[in-house]
Image (cartoon, rainbow, N blue to C red):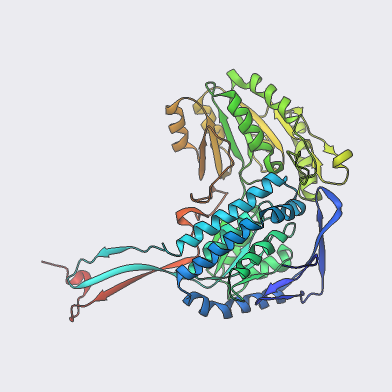
Amino acid sequence: MSTERIFKNFIGGEFVASRSGRTYERRNPADRRELVGIFQDSNADDVNDAVAAAKAAFPAWRRVPAPKRGEILLRAAELLQARKERYSRDLTREMGKPLFEAGGDIVEAIGMAQYAGGEGRRMHGVTTPSELPNKFQMSIRQPIGVVGMITPWNFPMAIASWKMLPALVCGNTVVIKPGEDASVSTYNLVECLVEAGLPPGVVNIVTGFGPSAGQPLVEHPDVPVISFTGSTEVGRLVYELAARQLKRVSLEMGGKNPLIVMDDADLDLVLQGVIWGAFGTTGQRCTATSRLIVHRRVTATLVERIVERATRLRIGNGLDPETEMGPLVNEDQLRRVLEYIAIGKAEGATLRCGGAQLSEGACAHGFFVQPTVFTGVTPQMRIAREEIFGPVLSVIEVESLDEALAVANDVAYGLSASIYTRDINAAYRAMHELEAGIVYINAPTIGAEIHLPFGGVKATGNGHREAGPTMLDVFSEWKSVYVDYSGTLQRAQIDNVE
């Protein structure tokens, strides 16, 4: 939405500089010599302006018929499709994932725009018969108000679309603070919405950092709904702050996702799934495969194949079409991953491949680390229990399905899990017993689609789901309506006697 690489806040349909007077740079994590953009280092005053704009736009927007709101989203989907290549390159530059993955991020936003747009004509309530004569009853959905959104950098357009588009089709207005490491994609998404006909003030963008911009948004008294995706640590703080004002809060947080391999599994298929699940997006997915729980009969064979393939992954700038794995998003994340690799070694796990920073050739100017595989990992090791958010795979050997399920469930998180087996009985047992919001059979732990609910249990979330048929629940209120046309007072259950 800016012809320059200076991105101002988008408030009330206008681009405005932060009241703080401060900005910050974002550089390509694959090549720090390349400037991606300069963004506003916003503060509470900027958040107040954005919320005021969203609040002022709400009365008119909520009265736009839901099908008409949906039509705007459908037009935005067409614009996203037409600009997919350009937006994919923007996304790769700002957070590092290879172009083919960045394209998938845009496609997910396209799909959500189409899905949420369709909900404008399918915003179903419930109609039931009354227990009294001459009385009609039904329920309807209504918007809530201004929704505050805090989104991460790893899927900067897809996750923004998961939150923003359902909120809009319900009739809410939005203030979004995108991840400071990847904000361009949010501007690109909003650009399409505005060109598709979204009125001024309905969506507002405030860039900046958590303490100075995110926290004022969470605490603002005119923001009744908060939708957050990020770490469990920050999510707990968001929940605590929002609870003081009894806000509705949707949290999507961390994961420590297991991929179970039984001794009857198709190892060719497993190999593909593990490499993609563990090292796709450089392991920077909340659904990444971080624990490989393998039956002892196939461990040695499978590990050898994984190590051989991992060491051949082409690592480099995501703009290179040959690249299979890009950089970590920033220096802090690089440091975190290297620290966990050191922890794994100190705990006694065996480093089978990787484990080092890459700083030569195509990787000389970025935050690159080798794909890393540990064996000899026990369930109590930190690398088997804590979210690393990098290309580090911990292999845990088990003797049986029962042990595999117990190990899989014995962590704080419960987002995604998978099992590879040809035994339908084992597959169905896993489907029911794995403590996860998402379960895959003969597929890795990544690959969710927008028309099923997305989210997890335990420390991964707080019971809400994004996407799918439940996606409107966070952003709408149920209202029950009773119409009594009897012409007399009917006292419900008191008069419901024979």
Say which quarter of the image contains residue 357: top right
* Residue depicted at 49% across the width and 75% down the height: 62
How far across and down, in percent of the image, does residue 226 sit? Answer: 57, 65
Whether residue 396 is visible here, answered yes or no, is yes
How far across and down, in percent of the image, does residue 117 sit? Answer: 50, 62
Name the image quarter holding the N terminus.
Answer: bottom right
How far across and down, in percent of the image, does residue 338 sit? Answer: 79, 40
Near-viewer residue (173 or 295): 173
* Residue depicted at 70% across the width and 56% down the height: 87
Instruction: Indicate whether 420 appears above or below 113.
Output: above
Q: How many marks?
A: 0
Whether residue 232 is visible here, answered yes or no, is no
Instruction: Indicate whether 327 appears above or below 136.
Output: above
- Image check: 70 left or right of 8? left
Name the image quarter holding the C terminus.
Answer: bottom left
Instruction: Indicate whether 189 appears above or below 53.
Output: above
